[in-house]
Image (tube, rainbow, N blue to C red):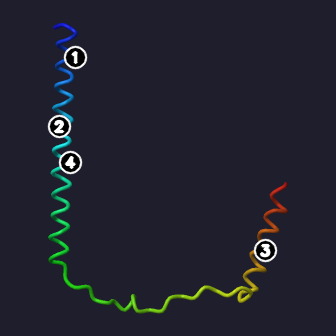
Amino acid sequence: MQDNDLLTEGLALMALGMGFVFVFLTILVITVTLMSIVIRRFQPATVNSPLQNTPKAKPAAVGQNDEAMAVISAAVHRYRRHKGR
């Protein structure tokens, strides 16, 4: 075979492979989209669970937890002091 024939066959095989992958991915996207539509249609109505009605935790106010701040500060100070050794 000549180089031109090999190049032509290679390009044809590449086009066939890329076409197959394109068609497969297109079918996959369509199938997943249709499945999503069907599942949303037949999904039962959502029921409020007891966990959803619990009150949210409020962030701690500044100065409210002084003991924790002191412990954290001491730990950072000790780490920095021993880091230099």
Instruction: Of the two numbered discs 1 and 4 on the same chain, state the one appearing first in sequence.
Output: 1
Give the left or right position of residue 54, taking residue 22 as reference: right
Instruction: Of the two numbered discs 3 and 4 on the same chain, state the one appearing first in sequence.
Output: 4
Q: Position of residue 66 (x, y in %)?
A: 76, 86
Does residue 70 sit above or below 50 in this rendering?
A: above
Q: Residues within 10 Å of mark 3 (few under 14, many from 20)?
A: few
Q: Within the image, what quadrant is residue 30 found in?
A: bottom left
Nearest-to-viewer mark from 3 and 4: 4
Looking at the figure, which quarter contains the N terminus?
Answer: top left
Q: Foreground residue, 60 or 85?
A: 60
Q: Secondary structure at mark 2?
A: helix
Which labelled disc corresponds to residue 73?
Answer: 3
Q: Within the image, what quadrant is residue 82 found in?
A: bottom right
Instruction: Of the two numbered discs 3 and 2 on the same chain, state the one appearing first in sequence.
Output: 2
Looking at the figure, which quarter contains the C terminus?
Answer: bottom right
Instruction: Of the two numbered discs 1 and 2 on the same chain, state the one appearing first in sequence.
Output: 1
Spatial CA span between label 3 and label 2: 63 Å
Q: Residues within 10 Å of mark 2 (few under 14, many from 20)?
A: few
Which labelled disc corresponds to residue 7?
Answer: 1
Residue drawn at the location 74% of the way across and 75% of the way down: 72
Q: Secondary structure at mark 4?
A: helix
Q: Which residue is mark 4?
A: 25
Residue drawn at the location 37% of the way across and 92% of the way down: 50
For the residues labelled 1 and 3, say whether their Cβ atoms are less than 8 Å apart: no
Q: What residue type is disc 4 on?
A: Leu
Q: Position of residue 27 (x, y in %)?
A: 15, 51
